[in-house]
Image: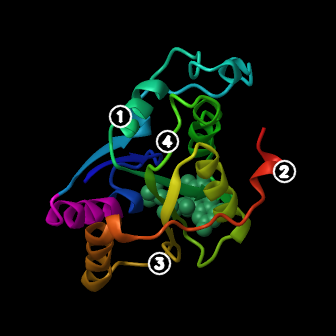
Amino acid sequence: MKVITLITSSNKHGNSKKIVDRLTIGIEDAGGSNEVLFMDDYNIKYCTGCRSCKNGGGCVLDDDFNMIMDKVRDADYFIFTAPIFYNDIAGHSKMFLDRFGSLGNDINLEMKEKKSLLMITHFSDYINDFVIKNTHRVIVSANFKVNKILDIGGLLTKRFTEDELESFEDIGYELEDYEVIPHELDLDSATV
Ligand SMILES: Cc1cc2nc3c(=O)[nH]c(=O)nc-3n(C[C@H](O)[C@H](O)[C@H](O)COP(=O)(O)O)c2cc1C
């Protein structure tokens, strides 16, 4: 199984990367591969809301978004990771997801049948459930299936034990087997 991971945290040695490294071990143990991309290494502009994508053909912005999504399209599984900043996913993480409108509006670009894992990391023990549900909804709006959600909190003081880190390897190993998770927000009412 070919996996593409996009880490939207700028911290190349942060919690997201630590966990992704263990997911990768599990994915590779199961015979797959995981190409890990840091959003920071790419030129990603924010959605201008020009609505050109509504006519098909993808996003008209000249940056690395289409190239990254081509890689995702060529893979079997997409892992998207976002840190929480001020009780929501970070601005740059949201900036990437805002571009998903161009995928949901073109049958040639859409990610139908593509499985995905959403990982959110934060210092607090819990975050508002809406943040998870809404981020899940945005990913589904681009026609991904979301098969696993990792909501990993308590990271201000937490030091992962080796057992906990190994549990991420298990998740990587079993990635292909997770059933699709139904989204809980009404897409029709909020997605144009
Ligand atoms: C500007 C900023 C705001 C943050 N706001 C929150 C917050 O509201 N709630 C929280 O639990 N963690 C918050 N955090 C902590 C990050 O979510 C946490 O460090 C996360 O694990 C970062 O992921 P990374 O290590 O992969 O970069 C904030 C961090 C920064 C830098």
Viewer-closest of 117 and 124: 117
Does residue 117 sit above or below 110 in this rendering? below
User: In 3D space, how far apart are the residues under numbered discs 2 and 1 (Cα atoms)?
Assistant: 30 Å
- Labels 1 and 4 touching (C-beta < 8 A): no
Q: Residue at x 68, y 18 (%)?
A: 55
Q: Earlier in the sequence, mark 4 or mark 3?
A: 4
Which residue corresponds to mark 3? 157
Q: Which amino acid does label 3 sit on?
A: Thr
Residue 128 visible at all: no
Q: Main secondary structure of the magenta part?
A: helix
**Circle 4 Cα neighbour tier, 10 Å, few/some/many (<14 / 14–19 / ≥20):** many
Q: What residue type is labelled 1?
A: Lys
Magenta stretch: give its range.
18-31
Nearer mark to the viewer, of 2 and 1: 2
Count every numbered label the image shows and give the total: 4
Whether residue 151 appears in magenta in the rendering, the answer is: no
Nearer mark to the viewer, of 1 and 4: 4
Q: Which of marks 1 and 4 is nearer the N terminus?
A: 1
Q: Which residue is drawn at 40% across and 59% down?
A: 16
Viewer-closest of 127 and 10: 127
Q: Earlier in the sequence, mark 3 or mark 1?
A: 1
> Residue 126: where, in percent of width, then height?
63, 76
Whether residue 23 appears in magenta in the rendering, the answer is: yes
Which residue corresponds to mark 2? 189
Quadrant of the rendered image holding ligand 1: bottom right
| Res. 98 image quadrant | top right
Q: Residue 111 carries which label?
A: 4
User: In 3D space, how far apart are the residues under numbered discs 4 and 3 (Cα atoms)?
Assistant: 37 Å
Which residue corresponds to mark 1? 71
User: Element type at marker 3?
Assistant: loop
> Residue 15: where, in percent of width, then height?
40, 62
